[in-house]
């Protein structure tokens, strides 16, 4: 909805508000956001448009040295709500003691200020290590044909530990919309040009994927991977309507297997040290 870290800089605020109202019309009642989205503007917009409806808000905070209680209260004020449905540590960092932040969030859960506590963007090994130390309710990670590494293992682990698995960016930040087949197709200055590897083996597989995959395929493939929560964005009401129509369908098994094979090839082509399509500079 709002510019964040160089992405979606041309988004129209009026269109964002129309899209939220369209979502409410379609009985969508859970909205995912983060304090970092638009430096707080996404939360403010949700509070402005949706807080008077019977909705639930999920949000995310960055690791911080500030008073976590005050950080959470800021989201509550922006969202105009009395509690947060799910709250995540957005980008865990080795430079900050984010586990202490997580423990405060769990204390706030006991007080009723949040319902569920989770983390985003950990590797499978990091997730297992965390859960041996601190219990969490939910885990959020990107899932798309461009990023499927460890997904099946993570899905099985979360299911066996009663952790809700939320999948975001099923369209690969729009790179799977059908409009892009290489780096040159992106607008000048688009932050996504440095987000993904368009050269070498990864670039070759990207072209193979985009040559056979439609936007509908990309979305239905993630749906078929069966996350507990599928987080899907839209920039205008028409896009939202289209996505909702797609989600009423299913992908056939032959198509699913073909796309899965391409996704596996891309995972194999990427560097082993790559944790996440969003954090690793190819």
Image: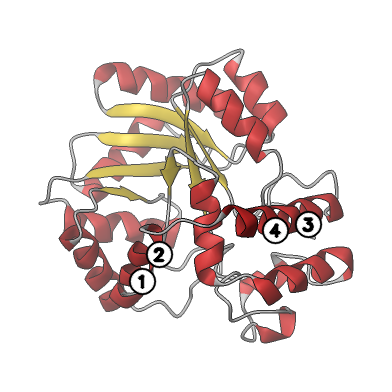
* Badge 1 density bin: few <14, some 14–19, many ≥20, Cα 10 Å: few
- Give the alpha-carbon distance from disc 4 to disc 2, as whole Å: 19 Å
Q: Nearer the viewer, mark 3 or mark 4?
A: 4
Give the percent coordinates (x, y) of residue 93: 64, 37
Instruction: Classify mark 2: helix, strand or loop.
Output: helix
- Give the alpha-carbon distance from disc 1 to disc 4, as whole Å: 24 Å
Instruction: Classify mark 1: helix, strand or loop.
Output: helix
Label placed on residue 119: none
Q: Earlier in the sequence, mark 4 or mark 2?
A: 2
Residue in the foreground of this view, choosing between 25 and 42? 25
Q: Earlier in the sequence, mark 1 or mark 4?
A: 1
- Give the alpha-carbon distance from disc 2 to disc 3, as whole Å: 25 Å
Q: Name the residue beneath numbered marker 2.
A: 246
For image coordinates 89% across by 68% down, the residue present is 200
Inspect this view and state whether residue 262 appears: yes
Q: Is residue 90 left or right of residue 150?
A: left
Q: Earlier in the sequence, mark 2 or mark 3?
A: 2
Q: Name the residue beneath numbered marker 1.
A: 242
Give the percent coordinates (x, y) of residue 42: 34, 59
Q: Is residue 205 left or right of residue 13?
A: right
- Give the alpha-carbon distance from disc 2 to disc 1, as whole Å: 6 Å
Instruction: Classify mark 4: helix, strand or loop.
Output: helix
In the picture, which quadrant includes the C terminus?
bottom right
């Amino acid at each position: 909805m709002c510019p964040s870290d160089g992405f979606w800089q041309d988004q129209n605020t009026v269109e964002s508000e129309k899209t939220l109202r369209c979502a409410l019309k379609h009985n969508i009642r859970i909205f995912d956001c983060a304090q970092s989205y638009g430096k707080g503007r996404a939360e403010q917009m949700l509070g402005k448009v949706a807080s008077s409806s019977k909705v639930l808000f999920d949000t995310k905070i960055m690791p911080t040295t500030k008073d976590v209680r005050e950080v959470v209260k800021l989201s509550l004020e922006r969202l105009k709500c009395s509690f947060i449905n799910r709250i995540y540590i957005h980008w865990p960092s080795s430079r900050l003691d984010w586990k202490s932040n997580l423990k405060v969030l769990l204390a706030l859960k006991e007080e009723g200020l949040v319902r569920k506590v989770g983390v985003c963007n950990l590797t499978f090994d990091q997730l297992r290590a965390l859960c041996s130390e601190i219990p969490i309710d939910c885990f959020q990670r990107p899932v798309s044909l461009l990023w499927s590494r460890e997904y099946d293992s993570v899905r099985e682990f979360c299911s066996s530990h009663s952790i809700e698995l939320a999948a975001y960016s099923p369209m690969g930040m729009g790179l799977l919309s059908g409009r892009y087949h290489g780096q040159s197709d992106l607008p000048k200055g688009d932050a996504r040009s440095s987000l993904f590897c368009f050269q070498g083996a990864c670039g070759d597989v990207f072209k193979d994927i985009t040559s056979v995959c439609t936007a509908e395929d990309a979305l239905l493939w993630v749906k078929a991977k069966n996350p507990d929560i599928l987080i899907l964005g839209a920039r205008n009401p028409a896009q939202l309507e289209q996505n909702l129509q797609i989600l009423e369908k299913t992908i056939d098994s032959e198509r699913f297997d073909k796309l899965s094979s391409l996704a596996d090839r891309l995972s194999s082509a990427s560097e082993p040290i790559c944790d996440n399509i969003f954090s690793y500079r190819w």
